[in-house]
Image (cartoon, rainbow, N blue to C red):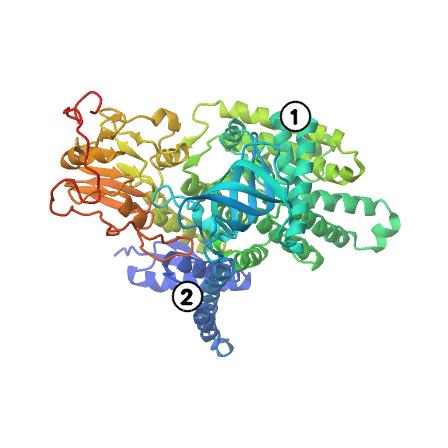
């Protein structure tokens, strides 16, 4: 009798073992894989994963302010049995992972306590005095970061320590100057939709407690007290960056000069929206943001120049460790470049990774290894745990992990054959360079695709072409010119170098504009949830970190993540956090704007829906929608009405006939609409999204978890209100409500019929 089973022989599944033996065989396969992981020293990177998991637990579940001693005690308890677990490697690995997770939670707790600062509670207009810390020039005006001395008479415990403001007049104050002006400030805006980008969280970790604009004249004044030395040095450095930005931009002019300046100083304010869109469509916007590519190229140029110069001296070449000397100079040079470019978060993480790789050369270790990547991740996360939540950290480390895992597959020496002639070697080197660039770009795009799609809802199908055509210009002309130009700048001999760099950047922009003109150069995909991202991230980790056949364990989570991402949960109604505007899915199946949401917010809603239209093309109430000075109405896909009320006189009719009532005002008790989203609801829940679910609605809110978070200022709700009134209304009462003025009569016309509302 023929027996059909499964047997693991050398890690290969065959048809010779009974089904009952499959489980022990799988256990043996896993044990063999773990043994190889330990032999290859590939378990250390999982400590970084556990450290990051502890950070995620803090940001996903912590409610209030945890006690720092708690995770530290947990880490100590997890490490206590380590000395006696030498003979039990599995238990030892679990104990170390638990300790790393506790330490990650502790790092997040410590970081939040260190950056804690007041956040403005509500929109306020008043006199502002302070010192200009940083300035980012724009095509029109500038954006300033100000260290606040006083604002609108607020007490120190209520006054933001730093604010970010825009200023559209001239002259523009310089970094380091103390100014006095009138400012209109508001709390940093929270997410425009549930699950969307939360600027308030990022602003909190940057120490920014309010954003807004300066109105009227700005007066330069003497500071009340001398600022600390650290702030004065930072202001001088920022002014030097602005001066070099203007010099580089002026050498070439136009957008090529603006992009060239951004590549050197990190100041991107002069780059126009059309140029940004073209760079994104070509998949090369990462070139403008100073990060891993710039750090590696800058360090590589310094390393090559120093090593080549020392190799020209016979004594140095024979007796000195010129490779290590070059690595040391490269470490100094890339650190100076990071400091001059603004020490941005992405640049700082890339600097850590680059320094570790150069340090590996000094220690005679492989420069590019998964252990070095894990060490860089641990250092970066210990310094800035919040970076784990952002696209910069996720995409940069994901790309490098993918490149290390696929290093053998993208070896650039594939076409270089031993014994070939000069022409053969030249052709082989050229083919290897092209295929290596294409393979590297492809691997990086695949590794970063889940994070880019989750955060930006866009995919650039022609990014492979854009990177293949522009990266040679960046590597061979742009970055070497940047290094040489910075060295020539103190001698005032840099202008020809900037002109040459601008020519190369102009070619890069021409390629970007050409690719951006392709049909569907940018594809907008519907937003998917954190579950899909978590599954794909787990798959990416399992595919890149192991060195054995345990990589096959990545297949199930990857398939699960792709399946979840392919089934997005589209919302039928979005409401902004102020109640000024909304987006309603009309009978045609597309979102249409209702009221006056900002262009940025409307763009976020459209992208989350997988709609690539520009915000201005989605303006208007859509099919069946009407607006007048009292408010707007629109129809949901099932024919029910949505009303957005601007004036109290619209409450009686709209509350009686609309299925959903939206308003930035406080709805009266007489509002008999089934669902009321008013000022009280938005103050408690933030931006709201609704999905039609049978005869009712399923609601999601930006503050849906109800947690107390330090970057969420809790302003007092309006008097006489109940937070979270998103339920069936109270029993009807006589109109008008005692707190409302008597409504003036309006023409008796059906506001929900065709034609303009009353």
Query: Above or below — where is 319 with respect to 746?
Result: below
Q: Residues within 10 Å of mark 2 (few under 14, many from 20)?
A: some
Q: Position of residue 530 (x, y in %)?
A: 36, 49
In the picture as drawn, the residue positioned furthest to the bottom comes out as 84
Asked whether the viewer can see residue 201, the reply is yes
Q: Position of residue 109 (x, y in %)?
A: 46, 63
Residue assigned mark 1:
253
Q: How many marks?
A: 2
Query: Above or below — where is 86 with respect to 701?
Result: below
Q: As drawn, is 19 to the left or to the right of 485?
A: left
Asked whether the viewer can see residue 416, the reply is no
At 35% from the left and 37% from the top, the residue drawn is 608
Q: Nearer the viewer, residue 311 or 514?
A: 514
Query: Above or below — where is 271 with respect to 70?
Result: above
At 61% from the left and 48% from the top, the residue drawn is 343
Q: As drawn, is 454 to the left or to the right of 322?
A: left
Q: Position of residue 268 (x, y in %)?
A: 58, 36
Element under label 2?
A: loop
Q: Residue 599: which disc? A: none
Q: Nearer the viewer, residue 41 or 618?
A: 618
Q: Nearer the viewer, residue 463 or 85?
A: 463
Which of the 4 image quadrants contains residue 292?
top right
Element under label 1?
A: loop
Q: As drawn, is 644 to the left or to the right of 465?
A: left
Q: CA distance from mark 2 to mark 1?
A: 52 Å
Residue assigned mark 2:
66
Q: Position of residue 277 (x, y in %)?
A: 50, 29
Looking at the rendering, in which quadrant would you find the C terminus? Answer: top left
Q: Are marks 2 and 1 in contact (CB under 8 Å)?
A: no
Q: Earlier in the sequence, mark 2 or mark 1?
A: 2
Looking at the rendering, in which quadrant would you find the N terminus? Answer: bottom left
Q: Residues within 10 Å of mark 1 (few under 14, many from 20)?
A: some
């Amino acid at each position: 009798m023929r027996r059909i089973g499964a047997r693991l022989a050398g890690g290969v599944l065959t048809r010779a073992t009974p089904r009952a033996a499959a489980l022990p065989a799988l256990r043996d396969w896993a044990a063999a894989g773990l043994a190889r992981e330990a032999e290859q020293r590939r378990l250390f990177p999982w400590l970084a994963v556990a450290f990051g998991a502890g950070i995620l637990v803090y940001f996903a579940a912590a409610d209030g302010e945890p006690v720092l001693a708690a995770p530290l005690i947990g880490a100590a308890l997890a490490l206590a049995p380590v000395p006696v677990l030498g003979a039990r490697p599995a238990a030892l690995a679990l104990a170390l992972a638990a300790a790393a997770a506790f330490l990650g939670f502790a790092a997040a707790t410590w970081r939040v306590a260190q950056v804690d600062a007041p956040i403005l509670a509500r929109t306020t207009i008043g006199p502002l005095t302070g010192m200009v810390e940083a300035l980012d020039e724009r095509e029109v005006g500038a954006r300033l970061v100000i260290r606040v001395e006083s604002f609108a008479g607020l007490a120190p415990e209520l006054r933001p320590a730093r604010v970010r403001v825009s200023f559209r007049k001239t002259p523009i104050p310089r970094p380091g100057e103390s100014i006095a002006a009138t400012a209109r400030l508001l709390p940093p805006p929270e997410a425009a939709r549930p699950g969307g980008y939360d600027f308030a969280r990022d602003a909190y970790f940057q120490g920014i407690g309010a954003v807004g604009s300066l109105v009227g004249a700005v007066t330069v004044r003497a500071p009340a007290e001398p600022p600390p030395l650290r702030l004065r040095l930072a202001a001088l450095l920022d002014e030097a960056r602005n001066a070099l930005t203007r010099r580089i931009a002026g050498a070439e002019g136009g957008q090529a000069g603006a992009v060239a300046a951004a590549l050197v100083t990190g100041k991107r304010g002069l780059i126009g929206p059309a140029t940004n869109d073209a760079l994104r469509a070509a998949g090369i916007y990462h070139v403008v943001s100073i990060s891993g590519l710039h750090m590696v190229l800058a360090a590589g140029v310094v390393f090559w120049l120093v090593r080549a110069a020392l190799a020209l001296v016979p004594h140095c070449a024979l007796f000195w460790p010129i490779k290590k000397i070059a690595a040391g100079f490269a470490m100094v040079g890339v650190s100076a470049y990071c400091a001059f470019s603004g020490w941005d978060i992405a640049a700082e993480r890339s600097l850590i990774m680059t320094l570790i790789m150069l340090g590996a050369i000094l220690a005679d270790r492989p420069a590019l290894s998964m252990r070095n990547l894990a060490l860089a991740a641990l250092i970066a996360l210990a310094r800035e745990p919040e970076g784990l939540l952002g696209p910069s950290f996720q995409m940069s480390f994901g790309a490098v992990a993918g490149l290390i895992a696929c290093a053998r597959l993208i070896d650039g020496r594939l076409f270089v054959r031993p014994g070939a002639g000069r022409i053969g070697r030249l052709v082989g080197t050229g083919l290897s360079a092209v295929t290596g660039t294409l393979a590297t770009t492809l691997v990086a795009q695949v590794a970063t695709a889940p994070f880019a799609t989750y955060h930006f809802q866009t995919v650039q199908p022609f990014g492979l072409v854009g990177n293949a055509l522009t990266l040679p210009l960046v590597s061979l002309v742009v970055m070497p010119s940047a290094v040489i130009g910075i060295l020539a700048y103190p001698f005032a001999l840099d202008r020809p170098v900037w002109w040459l760099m601008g020519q190369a950047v102009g070619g890069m922009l021409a390629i970007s504009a050409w690719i951006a003109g392709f049909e569907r150069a940018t594809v907008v995909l519907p937003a998917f949830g954190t579950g899909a991202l978590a599954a794909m991230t787990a798959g990416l980790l399992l595919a890149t970190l192991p060195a054995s056949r345990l990589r096959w364990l990545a297949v199930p989570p990857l398939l699960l993540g792709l399946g979840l991402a392919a089934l997005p949960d589209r919302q039928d109604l979005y409401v902004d956090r102020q109640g000024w505007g909304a987006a309603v899915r009309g009978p045609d199946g597309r979102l249409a704007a209702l009221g006056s949401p900002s262009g940025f917010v409307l763009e976020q809603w459209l992208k989350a829906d997988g709609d690539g239209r520009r915000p201005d093309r989605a303006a208007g109430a859509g099919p069946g929608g009407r607006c007048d000075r009292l408010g707007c109405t629109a129809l949901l896909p099932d024919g029910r009405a949505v009303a957005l009320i601007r004036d109290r006189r619209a409450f009686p009719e709209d509350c009686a006939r609309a299925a959903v009532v939206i308003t930035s005002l406080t709805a009266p008790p007489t509002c008999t609409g089934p669902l009321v989203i008013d000022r009280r609801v938005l103050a408690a829940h933030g931006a709201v999204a609704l999905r039609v679910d049978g005869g009712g609605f399923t609601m999601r809110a930006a503050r849906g978890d109800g947690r107390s978070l330090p970057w969420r200022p809790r302003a007092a709700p309006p008097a006489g209100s109940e937070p979270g009134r998103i339920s069936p209304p109270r029993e009807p009462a006589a109109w008008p409500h005692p707190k409302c003025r008597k409504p003036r009569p309006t023409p008796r016309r059906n506001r929900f019929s065709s034609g303009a509302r009353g």
